[in-house]
Amino acid sequence: MESTAGPAAHREVSLSRVRKARYVARNRRGGEIEVGEAEDGTFTPVELLLVAIAGCMAIDVDYITAKRSEADRLDVVASGTKIRDDQGNRMVDLLLGIEASFPEGEAGDAARAVVADAVAKSRDRLCTVSRTVSVGSPVSTDVVVG
């Protein structure tokens, strides 16, 4: 399969140090989120990975089901186990728990009928985040020290 990547497909965020083990991540649209250790309310990098996987699937499912009916509730819980083995530190047993409810009636019934298929499409094809984790992609580095 050929790649469809082009200049419009490029994504980028920046991370700036605030203090030891505390950073601010920024996107090009001006959004910010603090990243740190688990000592306070900031999200850890592993938690942000789980957020990214859950958020990607939630958005995919929302787009697909909303063509039939807006969800009354669409909640996703992402979990996994952090391990250290001969391959290094990593997450295993990633699981997404999805709960959705829709209004009574024909439109809500139609939305309920496609939830499982929407989840499968997101997991198997649509969600860039979980697909990258599942398929795997090497992470390159470019280091400059001043």
Image (tube, rainbow, N blue to C red):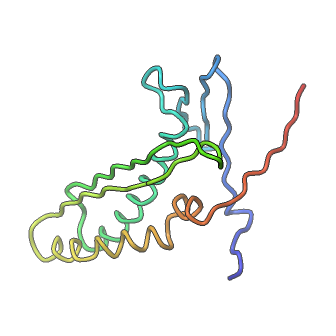
What residue sits 45% from the left and 45% below the top?
Answer: 81
Above or below for 113 versus 12: below
What residue sits 44% from the left and 21% below the top?
Answer: 40
Camera-side residue of 41 and 39: 39
Which quadrant holds the N terminus? bottom right
What residue sits 50% from the left and 42% below the top?
Answer: 82
Give the left or right position of residue 106, taking residue 95 as reference: left
Query: Which of the 4 image quadrants contains residue 23?
Result: top right
Q: Residue furthest front?
A: 86
Q: Residue furthest top?
A: 19
Camera-side residue of 110 and 135: 135
Query: Which of the 4 image quadrants contains residue 100?
Result: bottom left
What residue sits 88% from the left and 29% below the top?
Answer: 145
Camera-side residue of 65 and 23: 23
Query: Which of the 4 image quadrants contains residue 103?
Result: bottom left
Percent position (x, y) of residue 20? Answer: 64, 18
Give the left or right position of residue 87, taking residue 121 as reference: right
Which quadrant holds the C terminus? top right
Above or below for 23 versus 53: above
Q: Residue furthest bottom?
A: 1
Percent position (x, y) of residue 121? Answer: 42, 74
Give the left or right position of residue 18, taking residue 6 as reference: left
